Amino acid sequence: MHSADPPILQAAAKLRSGGIVAMPTETVYGLAAKIDDENAIRKVFSVKERPFFDPLIVHIADLEQRKLVVSEWPEAAQLLAAQFWPGPLTLVLPKHPSISPLITSGLETVGIRQPRHPFARDLIRLAGSPLAAPSANKFGKTSPTTADHVRQSFANDDVFVLDGGQADVGLESTVLRITSDKLEILRPGAITKEMLEAALGQAGLSLAVTRAISNASPGHTEHHYMPDIPLVLFRFPRKPISAELRKKIALDLNLSSRLIGTELILDSRPAIAARELYAKLRICAEAGGSYIFCHLPEESSDSLWEAINDRMQRAASRVYTSD
Ligand code: TXA
Ligand code: MG
């Protein structure tokens, strides 16, 4: 690798020589390794401090590459890929025998998606194989939407960071498990239940789309995406915080009673709120207060709010329903 080479060539060389690369995608940055390089995949788990029970998503450059990753390709997958790829939709399907159990945490299924960011697809092509990549943050912490976020988390690690600008969507992909009789959303995202149902309906496929209730996705744990200081959520209209509530928060979070809160205000347009969420969480965490508070947006008909709410809930230490 030569430092005069364009960054994408340096990134591909890093992958081909057994290294790992933070790659931009339209959702969040991913920490990528070649799927046929178990050592590099182990490095991803180790620098991320991620437990091995949490499977990785495999990223492909084009539809043809799916044949290297999955062993079945049902009609619903074909239809949804045609409609939503490249884009923020991960399909969970039976894995190809060659896919390492390290990637799938020993499961017989694998998550696969074709990202929309052109750098991601070019990098996969140049690397010569699909790339396994979780979000490029330490396990359980806020996901990165800029190259700087990644650099802050992995300053002391041997990670090549490919800068592709700010992530456009800002929330991780929708994870959808496809079985013969149903489709289950394991993690909500920018491709919503309504969008999936409409696409299937138009093609005359009558498959139910349900939202998995339990943690059907091993890594999508109750506490995730957490900022460096506690986040508390208020499920009541925006108003000054009462002295009583302030006391309660201090007690609940084990903070000094002179606590200073930094307010996180989300844009009222869901696409913008999603794009800005993680960067705002980081800015609030660095503002010098002792905790972050946010009034959750009122229920809305736009189900992108469901994905935003899902991430907020998991990032939060406490939720208060009244003041
Ligand atoms: O948008 C995204 O999906 C980003 C970018 C980088 O592509 N990636 C991402 O990866 O968010 P990660 O590792 O942070 O989250 C992957 C999620 C986890 O909740 C994991 O449990 C789930 O996908 N997952 C992966 N493979 C699975 C499988 N075979 N069955 C069930 N859940 C799976
Ligand atoms: Mg993640």
Image (spheres, helix red, strand yellow):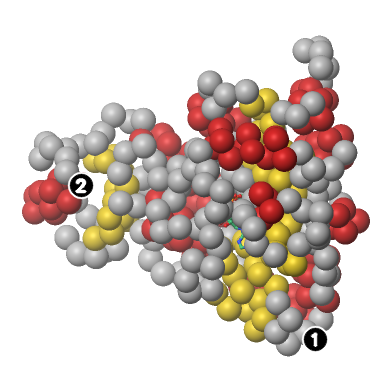
Quarter of the picture holding the N terminus: top right
Q: Secondary structure at mark 1?
A: loop
Classify 107 as above or below 42.
below
Q: Residue at x 70, y 64 (%)?
A: 109
Classify 253 as above or below 205.
above
Q: How many marks?
A: 2
| Nearer the observer, 285 or 47 | 47
Query: Mark 1 or 2, which is nearer the eye?
Result: 2
Quarter of the picture holding the C terminus: bottom left
| Nearer the observer, 274 or 255 | 255
* Residue to which mark 1 is pinned: 204
* Residue to which mark 2 is pinned: 253
Amino acid type at image mark 2: Leu
Looking at the image, tell me whether mark 1 or mark 2 is earlier in sequence order: 1
Q: Is residue 13 visible?
A: yes
- Return the x and y of residue 113 as percentages of the image width and height: 74, 55
Q: Residue at x 80, y 50 (%)?
A: 60
